[in-house]
Image (cartoon, rainbow, N blue to C red):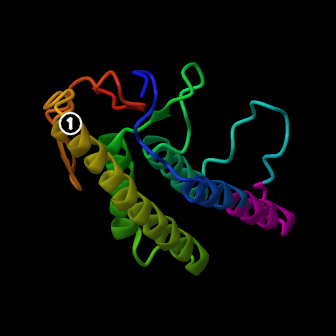
Amino acid sequence: MSEDAPKLHIDSDWKAQAQAEKERLAEKEAARVSQGGAGHDHGGAPGEMPPADFRTLVATLASQAMMGLGAYGDPQTGRVVIDVVGAQFAIDLLGVLEEKTKGNLTPEEADELKEVLAHLRARFVQIARLVASQMQRETDAGGEAGVAGSIGLGGLKDAGKPASASGLIIPD
């Protein structure tokens, strides 16, 4: 296998699920806007900022988490970028938001936040297991043993540079 070949295998099912989730969220937003989302029509000029509301806050944190979970590749290298620690932080912030706003949200907002958190937490566990498995294979193969550090569901510990042969980019 060539040295530049990615070792992390992200199956097409995972990619299809991520794309379906993006489409589902876009449809949900379009439906909300078409129902007269109380001045929330931000389909205006390109570069226009979305409304500063609860849904935008949740969507921003969810996007950060998805980015850290590899939903978007590095456009220059085409490699999947995984930032487990950053993703976990964004998910934890959403959890704090859920806890601190309990009883102060509309039923729709509470349901949406609960759904987003459930999805992100499940995806986090899936990606963390893939990353841990990849690191273990590299360590077992005598590759860059110990370079990437150890990983658990709590995130990366003592993370350094990723193994050069890996198709995985793990930020410092």
Could you say where residue 167 lies in the image, as x and y percent from the top left? 42, 31
Q: Which residue is mark 1?
A: 141
Magenta residues, dominant SS class: helix
Q: Residue at x 69, y 37 (%)?
A: 49
Q: Is residue 52 magenta?
A: no
145 or 100, nearer to the observer = 145
**Left of 160 or right of it: where is 77?**
right
Q: Residue at x 77, y 66 (%)?
A: 32
On screen, 109 above or below 65? below
Q: Residue at x 61, y 47 (%)?
A: 52
- The reply to whether residue 91 is visible in this rendering is yes
Q: Start and end of the magenta stretch?
A: 24-40
Q: Mark 1 falls on what kind of element?
A: loop
Could you say where residue 54 lies in the image, as x and y percent from the top left? 56, 58
Quadrant holding the C terminus: top left
Quadrant holding the N terminus: top left
Q: Residue at x 80, y 60 (%)?
A: 30
